Image (cartoon, helix red, strand yellow):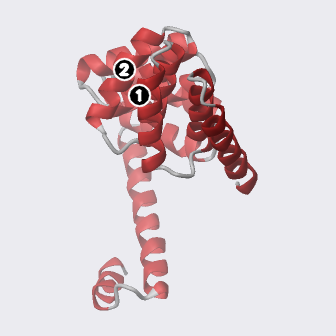
Amino acid sequence: AYQVISRAARAHPADVDVLYYLGLVTRRLAADEFDRLVRMAPDSARVHQLQGESLEAQERRADAEKEYAAALDAKPDLLEALLALGKLKRIRLACEEAIGLYDKAESIRPTFDAAYGLGVCHSYLQNDELAVKKFEQAVKRNPSAAVAWAGLGTSLVKLRRTAEGIAKLQRAIVLAPDMDEAHYMLGMAYQSAGDTVRAQEAFKKAEQLRVAR
């Protein structure tokens, strides 16, 4: 079935029905391969990692955390599980735990995800100097990541390096014009700089974007 539908997709790459059935077939093949993997190695690190990803996609984050932790019990240096568990810890603001996971991930291989996660966590813990360093690493690794530019700008403003912070926040908005948090923080930065007109414009834009969600 996969071979037939693949030929159809090559012949008609924009056909919605063909793409739909290609999705059904590939999803079934992936499920079959996952079941085979579970039978072959039911307690392997990769099985726990994939189960964690599935649970996370279902927004069952507590269960996903358990699966990622089980993956790391089986293979402590599994980078994907370290980053995934770090992100879930960060989301629920368990930042000290997340920092340990991200630091270990960085010792294995430096990534954007770990640098950004560390920036967010250090910012939350008011370690703004460290946050700036981590966000700078993040934007160097992925210059198109608006969230990292926004985090960098916010941390700079908190350190009263307002002019630098404004420039970084403006960069974030160029990359992601609909990011209401960046507009709001830009308003705070302008307000700190005494530019009340631009501050109000930024606050107004942030509110418009929030309402439009």
Q: In this view, does 110 lie to the left or right of 65?
A: left
Name the residue tied to disc 2: 134
SS at badge 1: helix
Residue 10, label in figure: none
Residue in the image at 50% along x and 29% along y: 87
- Separation of marks 1 and 2 at Cα, in angstroms: 6 Å
Q: In this view, does 191 lie to the left or right of 99?
A: right
Residue 125 appears at what percent x and percent y? 56, 10
Pick the front one: 143 or 199: 199
Q: Is residue 11 above or below residue 197?
A: below
Packing grade of label 2 (10 A; few <14, some 14-19, many >=20) is many
Pick the front one: 159 or 11: 159
Identify residue type, mark 2.
Lys
Which tag, 1 or 2, sits closer to the chain's start?
Answer: 1
Given contact means CB atoms under 8 Å apart, are the residues at marks 1 and 2 in contact? yes
SS at badge 2: helix
Residue 44 in view of the camera: no
Residue 122 appears at what percent x and percent y? 48, 14
Q: Residue 41 falls in which quadrant of the image?
A: top left
Q: Quadrant of the C terminus?
A: bottom right
Identify residue type, mark 1.
Tyr
Q: In this view, does 49 lie to the left or right of 88?
A: left
Packing grade of label 1 (10 A; few <14, some 14-19, many >=20) is many
Residue in the image at 28% along x and 85% along y: 10
Name the residue tied to disc 1: 116
Pick the front one: 2 or 7: 7
